[in-house]
Image (tube, rainbow, N blue to C red):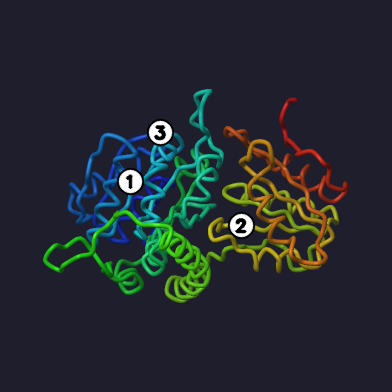
Amino acid sequence: MKKVLTGNHAVSYGAMIARAEVVAAYPITPQTQIVEKLSEMCADGDLDARFIKVESEHSAMAACIGASASGARAFTATSSQGLALMDEMLHWASHARLPIVMANINRSLGPPWTIWTDQNDTISRRDTGWIQFYCESNQEVIDTMIMAFKIAEQVKLPAFLTLDSFYISHTSEAEELPNQKLVDEYLSKYQAETDLDPTKGSPAYGSLTTDQWYFELQIKMQRAMEQAYDIILKENDLFEKMFGRSYLPVEGYRTDDADYVVFVSGTIASTIKDAIDRARENGIKVGSAKVRLFRPFPKAMIREMAKGRKRLGVIDRNISYGSEGAFFTEIKGALYSQSEHPEIHGFIAGLGGRDVTVDSAYEMIRLVVETSPEKDINWQGAKL
């Protein structure tokens, strides 16, 4: 069934189709529409879930932790400062091995006060132990919601998906709602291996541990995250077979014969395709590669995409202050183990919602093709 949805409501319908059982809700621009729609769905009986209104984002994640530990499929949504307020609970959720799913609408952190997009809110949570997906379109949002629950529940780690504020969150597109019977076949009812049912003699949660065991628990989390990569590939194959759509961790555009490849994420992946087409018309053999998965990081696919290229570029809509863009750092790290790899350029673009146009994307392509990497970050479009 086709339905015209904003990106925010794509999240809501994804949670409904995935049969979330507990929704913890606290409003924050530009996420509020997600939980408002879920509230309507619960009130109308379209979603059989416990809708919990909480007093803060910290409490929203705490409620999801309690629900998931009790054996329920839990969901929440947030953005920016709200995600920052959750930080303690994000670590708790992952260390407790709870398969919570959350949507984060990427929004710049203040001050100064801002509601526009960049990825610094989620990038600064890279080490919390959450699986991280970066979405390009509303359809990808719906489908990722469903797959995220399936993946998280297998590896017992939480997952969040991100979408650019206003570029996706408030933009409407005609989307295909997956058939509920097929989704139920793909994503069966969640059954926790252990839960907080006192009649079952449940184990204790959150008790004190010592250095004798803490190290081992962290290694188990790391192995689960590594296992998640293979499961993501497996579940994508199954999803494509059942629903006809595929979302690989790294997706190439016109890369088969490309001498140059530019790595991107989020909605910039759509913009740069027009710039790639323009470059091709001008005889430049260039392609782009959308990195959809940030944790676990798809190192093998990055290396394969980079193989045989003359130069690479990376466009980041984030910055690790004092260093560079996060995707740039990760991609360089993935290539470091190879004895030979192409030169690589890093660009910072679109911070605070600054528009990344086809013209600016084309200019970055030109710099990749015509110049060797500079020592300093290329601050695309900034007035310095």
Residue bearing mark 1: 61
Tell me, yes or no, if residue 139 can be seen here. no
In three-dimensional space, the C-alpha distance between marks 3 and 1, rounded to whole angstroms, equals 17 Å
Q: Position of residue 20 (x, y in %)?
A: 28, 57
Q: Earlier in the sequence, mark 3 or mark 2?
A: 3
- Compare residues 236 and 84 and report the one nearer the observer: 84
Residue bearing mark 2: 291
**Location of the N terminus (image quadrant):** bottom left
**Mark 3: amino acid:** Thr
Circle 1 — which element?
helix
In the figure, residue 84 lies in which quadrant?
Answer: top left
- Compare residues 104 and 369 and report the one nearer the observer: 104
Circle 2 — which element?
strand
Residue bearing mark 3: 29
Dots 2, 1 in contact, CB < 8 A? no
Q: Residue at x 68, y 56 (%)?
A: 331
